[in-house]
Image: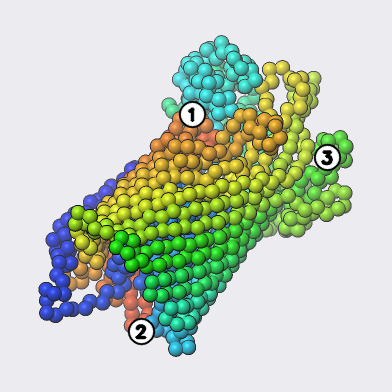
Amino acid sequence: MSRLTVPSLARYLLASSCLISVVSAPVVFAQSTETPGDSETVETVVVTGTRASLASAIDRKRRAGTVSDSIVAEDVGQFPDKNVGEALSRITGVQLSRDFGEGVAVSIRGVEPDLNRVEINGLSVLGTNGEGSRGADFRELQAELIQSIDVFKGFTADMTEGGVGGTVSIKTRKPLDFKKPTYSATFSGQKLSLDDEWTPRISLFGTRKFLDNRLGVLFNATFDHVNTRQDYTGNTEWARLADFDQSPEKTVDYYNTAYGADVSRQIADVDTWGGCSSLTSSNTSIISTATMRSQCLTQWWDYTPRTARYRVWDREDKRLSAELTLQYRINDQWSVWGSYNKNQRSQRLNDRNYGTAFTAVNRLKTGSIVSGDPASVPAGIVVDDNHNVIAYTVSTRLAGVTVGGNDAFSTSSRDFQLDIDSDYVSGGFNYRGDRLAIEFTGAHAESTYYDSTNGVTLTADSPGLKVSLDPSTGVPSFTFAPGYETSNLSAYNSLAVQYRPRENDITEDQFKLDIDYDLDLPFFTKFETGAQYRKSGSLLYRDSGYIVSTGPDLIAGTADDIRTISARIDRTYDLTTNAALLASLAGAVTDLPSSFFDGYNDVSGQASNWLVPDTAAILKLVGTEGFNHNNLRQALGTDGKVYPQIPVHDIEEEVKAAYAKLNFETGLFGLELDGNFGVRVVSTSVLAAGLLQRNERRSTPTVDNPAATTNYQISNSIVSIDESYTDVLPSFNLSTWLIPNELTVRVGWAKVMARPKMTDLVPSAVCTFDATGGAIADDDFVDICSAGNPGLKPYRADQFDLSGEWYPNRDTQFSVGLFHKDIKTYILNRTLVRNVDYFNDGNVIDVTMPINGQGAKIKGVEVAFKTAFTFLPGVFNGFGIDTNYTWSEAENGGLYSELDGSELPFPGLSEHSYNVSLWYDKGPINARLAYNGRTEYLVTAADRSGKPVYRDGSEYLDGKITWKASNGVSLFVEGKNLTGTAERATSGDIRLNELSWPGKRVFVGVTYKR
């Protein structure tokens, strides 16, 4: 864990690598000066292993038509990482997000994963997160069959659009690529430091040719049983509830998007508590005077930890990936191929929570806390100099929900059973003539996401509970009052049981035709054209259950309603009146099975054990009737009829694209120039349907509260919106060799686009309309919706690249690149927009929804150096190094903190990222030590409490060593997260959201290949 920019270790390694390159330059670079004509004897050197892969990656970069970087595995099973995302993180400008210690998704040049394209053999990879995401989960991509990965940061017209940051193009091997029958098997065991069990990973590969080497058959299968665990401590999120420190200094200047910039500025100009009482609203349709004055005082409210807790997540993940490919060469010009790929994941995830919630002042006292009145502040509150509450004591009062110690502490367990089943069927043909080349690919892909979540929660009264945060780290600890220790089952007074089902169906059909024609012209060398068609869909059901009709009285919750049965289940049991159930729970509650944060030494004062409800055992006691998916897609209504349930979303997207591209070569002022220019035209149509829930706010006065109101659910319905747009994407790339075949300069310009997230496009909305008829004085409530935005335009950007690349020999590359992205349109989430005719019916309403923003710019510098130290004597010439560094910065991102209106950085963008890989490959030994790091970045602009969340910088060290025994047998040992890195997310300062510890992982295995 690090909060530094470029850590000292990274600086040292980078400086060392640069020094080695400079010192060794005369010797290394001299290797390329001798030509065959300089000597009568030409010695042929066969390069294999890591050095061959390095040379191949360098060669791919120098031959590319635009700015790119590559990873190449010259042999089966020799990809440098088992996780594709972790391998990508070694590339310049690529930043990795991890989950449970595994690489999940990548940002390219600071652009979030959903806005980068990932493809395998030119075909899209389905997003399988259960929400219709476009981003690929790299845990599902097995690395054994991968031949190469190209990360294209520039753009050419023949590339499929969709990557504002870049395109990850993965190529797998084809059976006719092999010169002889090849078979490989790898058996390994893996173990996590937080788990006692060893689990298997097995990979089988085979290919051979038939029919006079015209028919090739290839089969690959990988089974991976991964046990992961992640321990958490933290406060989840931070709220601002009251002025606990009574300091005359403001905590923040006022800012609230709901009231607009003018109102926020007027309130923020007030510098004293007393000044708030003199404020007067100039527009009561936006905010009343009373509300303005009360909002003014919130500027002195302090930061409070909302949910201090410990968590342990265990995940057992079984992954199976299998591929069968047939390739037939009809003659020297024509070949056809077909492939079937099957991916399956069966995952069981258990989440154990232990903590408390501080969501209102009445957790500590009865009555309000008044600024300027220290006597109103309860005892036990400690606030630091930066207005962070770092200690508080729960009141001894037990009456009322969330009041005092009533239900103040809980321990819970949730079990997630997730099954993902994906099928990819693809095929095509290739024609290679003297001047004409044609390639056609067609594919159908479908994936089902089937999730069932069971949860049980035991809640206890905990009067006098003291919560303390470490003043330097924000890590919480708990001290219980005598008689209320939660290690005793009798302390718990209620049991809650829940069930949450979800299903997501994803499909995509793709057809792609590319035609290349070599031109016999003095300037133009090749003409390329092609077309592409894609149709994708996402259908999501979650929980379900809705009001079909509210009956004649038009009010939900009355006897004449017609409602479908919900697939969601919530049950609560009172343990104070059910002694038998409480007694039976003794056999359904266990201790945490292993030490909390075992092996991590940077936290202290944590509970090493606590009572954990056994979800399966408790559900067996109380029953699981209805715990299934039977009511998820259709269900009985209260009138006895069967009704279809309303999906969360139903999205269909159709894309048609065509392109033309010209490659050219010429000379100018003694320099050889080559490049390409072209244009891609893309038409996108989106048909989206979702749930519209209409609520009405009605006056329900009481004697104690004449201004009381109640929200009534009036109706549910499906809304559908059809949108379409067209993009014209020109591109231009130019390169020249300043020193022939050694020093080149590239420039590139292109318009690029990426489509919005499907979940942002859904027209689902929850709307509340005022029906009080003006019965409430000083009421500033306005009609409002929280909704998606099917009218969103895609992310659109102009991007510019300038790079210099030096290739002194086939084993060495030194490059410096500059990039600039001018993002013309992007998407801002959770933005309040006033007076929107959302339903196109002439009625305006305030809507919180994602909207398009304009003007963001991202710029950066990329530096890379890689070489093999073949000039060193003896065994030392097997060493090599691969290093890179990226600096990037965003401007005018259009994101502002909901807390104080300050401008926020671009999400997912670290200012610094860096890699250093030292490898050795000679004789029977192959070894690699890889160091990867990135600095702090913004995770989200607003969590549930409206606070921005940052993730601290982190560094990871991985290593692998392989010993090649005789007869095709290799033994290997691999370690992940050798430095024991934990991830830390905060809301700034010491406001810890979570500290997560994934442990370390080791692999031991054997590979046989012939």
Residue at (46%, 70%) from the top-left corner? 438
Q: CA distance from mark 1 to mark 2?
A: 66 Å
Check whether the beta carbons of the residues at disc 1 and disc 2 lie within 8 A of each other: no
Question: Residue 770 or 401: which is nearer the viewer?
Answer: 770
Q: Amino acid at mark 1?
A: Gly
Of the pair 417 and 583, the residue shown nearer to us: 417
Residue 668, x across and y down, in percent: 23, 55
The disc, 3 or 2, on the residue closer to the chain's N-terminal end is: 3
- Residue at left 46%, top 52%? 163
Q: Which residue is mark 2?
A: 967
Tell me the distance, in whole angstroms, between the alpha carbons under discs 3 and 2: 76 Å
Looking at the image, tell me whether mark 1 or mark 2 is earlier in sequence order. Answer: 1
Amino acid type, callout 3: Thr
Residue extending furthest toward the top: 278
Residue 186 in the image, given as x and y percentages of width and height:
44, 75
Q: Give the residue pinned by disc 1.
A: 901
Q: Measure how far apart labels 3 and 1 are at the Cα level.
A: 42 Å
Q: Which residue is mark 3?
A: 550
SS type, badge 1: loop
